[in-house]
Each structure stands twice: as C-alpha cells, then as structure tokens.
Amino acid sequence: MGTKAVSGKGHISDLSASGMFIATDSPRRPGERFRLVFSIPDSGPEIIAEAEVVWAREPGSWPPDEQGMGVRFLGISDDAAVRIRSFVGGEAAGGTGDR
C-alpha cells in the first residue's frame, strides 16, 4: 500500500515515539498510510513521519468520545523519536506545553 498525500488539521494527544491520537473532524480509515508533519514546542524543526491509521472514531460512534484516529509511526527519524521522548518525559514530570 502506498503513502497518500493528504492535508488536514487536528489536535494531537497521547503522543509517543511510536504514534499518537489525532482529534479531527475527518479521520482517515484504518490501514490508510500518509505523511504526517507536526511540531512540538521545542526549538527543533517540524517532525515528518510516515504514519498508518490503526483505528478511527467516526462521528456518532460509541462511546461518544472525541472523534479522530489513532496512528502509528512507520517511519520517523531517530532524532525526531528522541525529541518526542524528551518532550513527553518533560510533560510527565510536570513540564509545560500543549501536546
């Protein structure tokens, strides 16, 4: 399966070096692969990752949680993974920043 070029916006939560949840009004379908570009609040450049949708919450799904999709990273640079781990570790230790 190839990687699709898609465009959209979403709010990131549950970020880890292996994936994230993206709250969005237009979640992609499980199995869909795409290039993901996002930023974390550090001084580094945007993070670029190849991602795959693992699961999705469509509008009107049950339980009525925030709609969006869980994605896993299929390809991410070692530097980006280290930056994410550092950011998430800082958040867990009481750091600031929106993730």
Image (spheres, grey):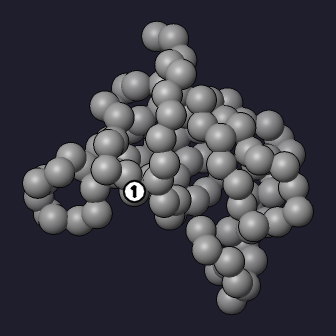
Quadrant location, the C terminus: bottom right
**Hey, what amino acid is under mark 1?**
Ala
Q: Position of residue 60 (x, y in %)?
A: 11, 54
Q: Mark 1 packing: few (<14 Cα in 10 Å), some, or many (20+)?
A: some
Residue depicted at 17% across the width and 51% down the height: 59
Image coordinates for residue 33, horizontal then vertical, percent = 48, 25
- Expressed as whole percent of the image width and height from the top left, the position of residue 72 reads 52, 40
Residue at 52 percent across and 59 percent down: it is 12
- Give the secondary structure at mark 1: strand
* Residue 57 placement, left or right of 10: left
The vertical placement of 95 against 98, above or below, is: below
> Does residue 50 lie above or below 56 as drawn?
above
Q: Position of residue 5 (x, y in %)?
A: 53, 22
Residue 8 in view, yes or no: yes
Asked if residue 11 lies left or right of residue 26, the reply is right
Quarter where residue 15 is shown? bottom right
